[in-house]
């Protein structure tokens, strides 16, 4: 198999790049490799975990996107790379019983873009990997949702039998992922209770605790946003503990450095990310967090036609700061590489202008009617605090903008209307 431009990883950045290049260059020249068959925009995984977004309805088929946008889709995981012969290996695809559906394949490339995202960084905390769920992928969010549903049903049955029962959710990490999940879970628990859990009183029976090591939650965001988020969480009955360094995690309990123990029937790790470990075996330069080191033009250091973008890339900006692992950055980098690779494909000079990250602000979702955040003004250093329904609408528009980039404006509009109508004729949370 051969692709002139091969993109590995069809997430927030890679899929936008493949779709936009595919529309210009076509399937003979653009190829996308992904280890999954469907795409979900990663920032919505907390909604999948809480059950307020149905992964089966939300997931976009890569085969459909390839057909509609004009790229070739290869299903399987990148496992090895030979930079000399410009070939990469894609893993075989097996059924859950181990039967082979697709064999291992070798893909030749002229230009390669690695966009495989990130995974959890457990910082060596004992028990973290074994006893927590992270929101790295749809499977993780679904595992959390099913576990939550089971525990809600068990608590409801126990309450019905007169016993004292709680669902204790502990979220470790007070960044955007942890805060959004806590808020979404609060909203979802009362919805679940209204669907047949007659004995469950969420405000009494579902306890959500958010543990953060720093002096405040949402540490990279402006203080006003963090304070507003803290207030909204505590108003919703979420226990927020700051300056809490988790030292060990067991099956039903989290312990911090002061010896405080938090009961945890369901524990989420949202305390840090790192690049997937296999990147360290590809023969490319990586930093301490396993991210691939790239230059200002997103070229992997030491190579001219291998690029990396998004969470898996260590890109130091002209200001000396590393570009943060955010969907906003992945989107901008995809757009930068789209222009660069199109110029190369049409035999024009790509130029030497580096990619420069532009921070347009951050929005943190608080369920389906509220968000808080800050938007950057066009003047440097100026930012505006936003909250309420307006902020929520802006947050939703980011998801729609990603859909528009990969589906086109018309299909995004049709899908948005269809989903609005489906929501009115189906339960507000996924119950199966
Ligand atoms: C719950 C949650 C909320 C978030 N909220 C926000 C937010 O509000 N704003 C924001 O800016 N950011 C947010 N983020 C961060 C944001 O999701 C990421 O920064 C962004 O998705 C990174 O994009 P990416 O393209 O680098 O990787 P991803 O979007 O993670 O995509 C990686 C892709 O690579 C594929 N892949 C992985 N390994 C392989 C392999 N070996 N071979 C082939 N394919 C592979 C995966 O299947 C996936 O499709 C949030 C993240 C989470 C988890």
Image (cartoon, grey):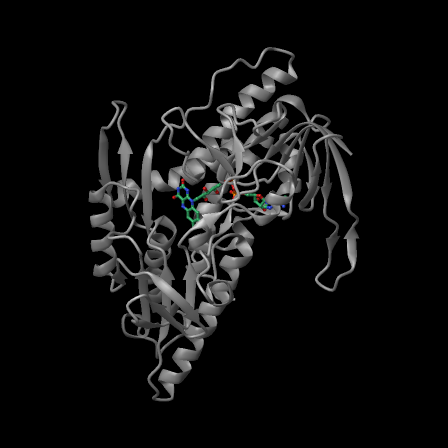
Asked which quadrant contains residue 237, the reply is bottom left
Is residue 406 in view?
A: no
Give how far across and how far down residue 136 sits, in percent.
Answer: 50, 52
Q: In this view, does 417 lie to the left or right of 213?
A: right
Q: Residue at x 22, y 34 (%)?
A: 384
Give how far across and how far down residue 218 sits, in percent.
Answer: 30, 48
Whether residue 408 is situated above or below residue 33 in the rendered picture: above
Is residue 209 in view?
A: yes
Residue situated furthest top in the rendering: 348
Residue situated furthest bottom in the rendering: 162
Q: How many labels does the image show?
A: 0
Whether residue 189 is situated above or below residue 395 in the rendered picture: below
Give how far across and how far down residue 179 sits, in percent.
Answer: 33, 54
Q: Residue at x 52, y 63 (%)?
A: 143
Give how far across and how far down residue 86 sits, in percent.
Answer: 72, 30
Q: Nearest the camera: 416 or 71? A: 71
Q: Residue at x 37, y 61 (%)?
A: 171
Q: In this view, does 98 lie to the left or right of 419?
A: right
Whether residue 16 is situated above or below residue 47 in the rendered picture: above
């Amino acid at each position: 198999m051969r692709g002139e431009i091969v993109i590995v990883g069809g997430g927030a950045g890679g899929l936008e790049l493949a779709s936009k290049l595919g529309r210009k260059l076509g399937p003979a020249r653009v190829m996308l490799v992904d280890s999954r068959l469907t795409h979900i925009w990663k920032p919505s995984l907390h909604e999948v975990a809480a059950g307020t977004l149905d992964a089966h309805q939300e997931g976009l088929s890569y085969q459909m996107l390839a057909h509609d946008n004009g790229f070739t889709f290869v299903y399987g995981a990148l496992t090895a790379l030979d930079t000399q012969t410009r070939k990469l290996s894609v893993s075989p695809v097996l059924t859950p019983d181990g039967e082979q559906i697709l064999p291992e394949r070798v893909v030749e490339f002229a230009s390669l873009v690695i966009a495989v995202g990130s995974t959890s960084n457990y910082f060596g905390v004992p028990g973290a990997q074994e006893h927590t769920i992270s929101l790295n992928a749809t499977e993780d969010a679904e595992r959390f949702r099913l576990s939550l549903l089971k525990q809600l049903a068990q608590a409801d049955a126990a309450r019905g039998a007169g016993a004292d029962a709680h669902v204790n959710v502990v979220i470790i990490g007070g960044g955007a992922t942890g805060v959004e999940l806590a808020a979404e879970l609060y909203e979802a628990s009362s919805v679940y209770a209204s669907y047949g859990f007659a004995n469950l009183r969420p405000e009494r029976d579902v306890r959500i605790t958010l543990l953060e090591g720093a002096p405040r939650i949402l540490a990279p965001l402006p203080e006003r946003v963090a304070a507003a988020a803290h207030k909204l969480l505590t108003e919703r009955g979420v226990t927020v503990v700051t300056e809490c360094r988790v030292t060990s995690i067991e099956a039903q309990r989290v312990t911090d450095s002061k010896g405080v123990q938090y009961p945890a029937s369901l524990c989420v790790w949202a305390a840090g990310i790192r690049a997937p470990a296999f990147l360290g075996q590809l023969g490319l330069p990586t930093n301490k967090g396993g991210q691939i080191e790239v230059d200002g033009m997103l070229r992997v250091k030491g190579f001219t036609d291998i690029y990396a973008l998004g969470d898996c890339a260590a890109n130091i900006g002209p200001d000396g700061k590393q570009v943060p692992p955010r969907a906003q950055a992945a989107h901008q980098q995809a757009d930068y590489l789209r222009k660069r690779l199109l110029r190369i494909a049409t035999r024009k000079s790509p130029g030497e202008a580096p990619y420069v990250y532009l921070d347009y602000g951050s929005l943190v979702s608080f369920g389906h009617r509220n968000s808080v955040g800050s938007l950057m003004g066009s003047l440097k250093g100026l930012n505006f605090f936003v909250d309420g329904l307006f902020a929520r609408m802006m947050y939703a528009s980011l998801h729609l903008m990603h859909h528009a980039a990969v589906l086109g404006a018309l299909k995004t509009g049709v899908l948005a209307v269809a989903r609005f109508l489906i929501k009115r004729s189906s339960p507000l949370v996924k119950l199966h």
